[in-house]
Amino acid sequence: MSPTSARAKPVPKAKAKAKVSQRLVILVATRKGAWLFHGDSRRKSWTVDGPHFLGHTISHLQMDPRDGRTLLAAAKTGHLGPTIFRSTDLGRSWKEAQQPPAFAKPSGDLPARSVDHTFWLSPGHASESGSWYAGTSPQGLFRSEDGGVSWAPMPGVNDNPQLREWMGSVQDGTPDGPKLHSIIIDPRDPAHLYFGMSGGGVHESRDGGRSWATLIKGMQVVGGFDPDTVTFHDPHCLRLCPSNPDRLYQQNHCGIYRLDRTGDPAHDVWQRIGGKMPKRVGDIGFPMVVHPFDADTAWVFPMDGSDVWPRTSPAGRPAAYVTRNAGKTWQRQDHGLPTDQAWWTLKRQAMTVDAQAVPALYLGTTSGELWIGREEGSKWFNIARHLPEIYAVEVATLP
C-alpha cells in the first residue's frame, strides 16, 4: 500500500498521462525516495505518484518553472555515491546526469575535497534557459547550462581561499555535514546571486559568482564566539521577497532576521525580528517562507532549540507563525495540527507556499507527514502520512 492518508490515492501507472492536465504538483524529497502529489485547481483532491528512487536519499526535488515539466532530483544512492537525476516528462522517466557536481582539483595549497551529496537545487534566471545552480556538502557551488545534464564547479566559491577558510572543515557545521544552501537569483539581474553556508555566513555576488561579499552585519552568533568571524555564522534558510527583491528574510541558528537593501553596503544591516515571538517558543527553527505578493508577510516553523537542541516542536505542540507587518508581531497558526505529543519538526527546505490568488502553505515533517495550510496557513489539513523522513517540499504550477 502507498504510505498516504485517505486524501491521497495512488495513481495507476496506466493513467499517468492524466497528471499533466492538473494544475499543481507538490514535490516531496525524503530520506528514502521522492513522491509527487498532483492536485486539482481547488487544492482539495490529491493523487500520489511514487515512490521514485525508493531507498535513495533525495535531498531536494525541483521543477523548472521555465518549461513546467523538467524535474531535477539531488540524490545520494548508497554505495554509488552522490548524483543528479533528470526528467523531462514530469517524472515518467529519469536519466542520471552525465557529469554530476564534483570538485575540481584545487589550486594552490587548498586541500582537495569530494562531494558527499548535493543538498540544494535552484533553477537559473528566467532569461537563461537551461541554467541551474547546485549547492553541496561540503560547501560548494556548481552551475549547469544544459538543464542539469552536466555541472561545472564555480571556482569563485570553491577555490576562493577566504570562503574556504570560512567554511571550516568537514567536521564543522550541521550534524549531517556542512552545506551550501539557499541559492537565490535576483529576478531583475541574472548576475546577482546570494547563498548561505552552514556554517560560514551569507554571501552575495553581483558578477555572476566571480567575486563575493559577506552579508552578516547585525547577525548574532552562539554566545562565546566572535560575531566578526564569518565561520561562526550559521544561516538556516534565506529567502528573497518576490514582490520586493530588495528585502530578504532569514531563519538563523540565532533567530529570525530581515534585511532591507539600501544601496549602501554600510547601511545593509540585518534586523532581528524574532523578538516578538512568544518566549516559551522562541525564534529558533529551520525553514523560512515569504508571501508571493506581500513583502510584509512571512512564515516560520519554530523548533525546540533549548539545551542540547532536541530538534522537536516546542512542548510537542507544532505550529507555524506568521507576521504580516515585517516582523513587528507574530501570530500562531495551528488550527488542524496536533495539539500535543507531536514531537516532529521541519528541515530547512520542508516548507513552501504556492502562488495562487489566496496562497496555501505546504510542509513536510521529520515523521513523514505532508500538510497543506489553506488560506495562508490559517487551516491545516493532512495530505499524506507514513512517508519516510521528509527533507524538502516544493510546489509548482503546471501548464
Image (spheres, helix red, strand yellow):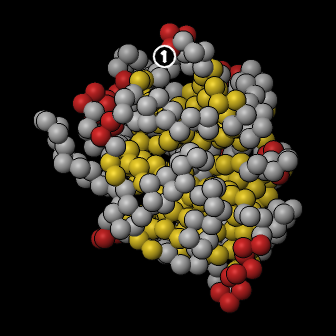
SS at badge 1: loop
Quadrant of the rendering where the N terminus is positioned: bottom right
Asked whether, in this view, residue 6 is left or right of residue 247, the answer is: right
Compared with residue 300, is residue 342 higher up or lower down, i.e. above or below? below
Which percent across, then down, holds residue 245?
Answer: 65, 30
Residue 187 in which image quadrant? top right
The mark total stands at: 1
Residue kind at label 1, given as amino acid type = Lys
Residue situated furthest top in the rendering: 266
The residue that label 1 is drawn on is 217
Q: Which residue is found at the position 38% from the left and 48% from the top? A: 142
Residue situated furthest left in the rendering: 109
Compared with residue 96, is residue 314 higher up or lower down, i.e. above or below? above
Compared with residue 377, is residue 240 higher up or lower down, i.e. above or below? above
Asked whether, in this view, residue 387 is left or right of residue 164, the answer is: right
Q: Which residue is found at the position 26% from the left and 38% from the top? A: 159
